[in-house]
Image: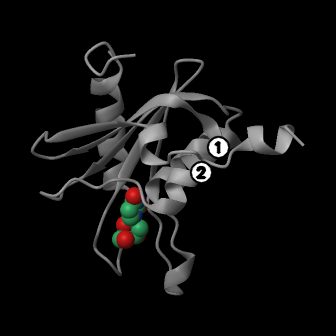
Amino acid sequence: MSVEKNNDWPQLIASAQQGYHNAYAPYSKFQVGAAAMTEQGTIVSGCNVENASYGLTVCAERNCIAQAVIQGQQTFSSMVVYTEQEKLTPPCGACRQVIAEFFAPEAQVMAVNHLDNRKVWTVAELLPDAFTPKNLLEQ
Ligand code: THU
């Protein structure tokens, strides 16, 4: 789907913004919100959740996907990552791997900020030649 043809962006951005406000980021102060559109047409959101044992921090994207899986949703068409940083926030490497598990390579991921600056990637652009469940099924 072309970026312009995805009519879900406004709703996804609003949900990612809501997620952002729930972020638990007392250490980095770097709040992140994420929202994903499920195959069934419902939106699930998430935020980053940090921990005093810093390495246990979980990013907004992974919490968003886990939240959807808990609700029984495992297929997604697009995702938005919202921050209030001038520099847009792309998904980190760990999140790219988890996104590649559940999103088709042509699914779109948007980074957007409070200034409405936007950047859209396909999942394949974020993680080319990803190792996915397909690799295991080919055994
Ligand atoms: N973070 C996310 O939630 N998503 C990203 O894609 C980048 C980083 C979080 C993790 C941590 O709580 C804070 O941002 C600073 O790294």
Q: Tag 1: Cα neighbours inside 10 Å, few (<14), some, or many (≥20)?
A: some
Query: Can you say whether 126 is above or below 58 in the image?
Result: above
- Residue at figure coordinates x 60%, y 47% from the top left: 130
> At label 1, which amino acid type do we have?
Glu
Residue at disc 2, secondary structure: helix
| Mark sitting on residue 101 | 1
- Residue at figure coordinates x 47%, y 35% from the top left: 36
Q: Is residue 12 left or right of residue 135?
A: left
Residue at label 2?
98
- Residue at figure coordinates x 12%, y 57% from the top left: 86
Residue at disc 1, secondary structure: helix
Query: Can you say whether 133 is above or below 31 in the image?
Result: above
Pointer 1 residue Cβ closer than 8 Å to ligand 1: no
> At label 2, which amino acid type do we have?
Val
Q: Do we see residue 64 in this rendering?
A: yes
Q: Do we see residue 23 in this rendering?
A: no
Query: Can you say whether 62 is above or below 35 in the image?
Result: below
Pointer 2 residue Cβ closer than 8 Å to ligand 1: no
For the rendered model, the colour scheme is one colour
- The quadrant where residue 60 appears: bottom left
Query: Whole-Å distance between the Cαs marked 1 and 2?
Result: 5 Å
Image position, residue 120 (x, y; %): 30, 36
Q: Is residue 32 left or right of residue 68?
A: left
Image position, residue 124 (x, y; %): 48, 38
- The quadrant where residue 119 appears: top left
- Residue at figure coordinates x 82%, y 45% from the top left: 136
Image position, residue 96 (x, y; %): 50, 52
Q: Is residue 119 left or right of residue 134?
A: left
Contact between marks 1 and 2 (CB within 8 A): the answer is yes
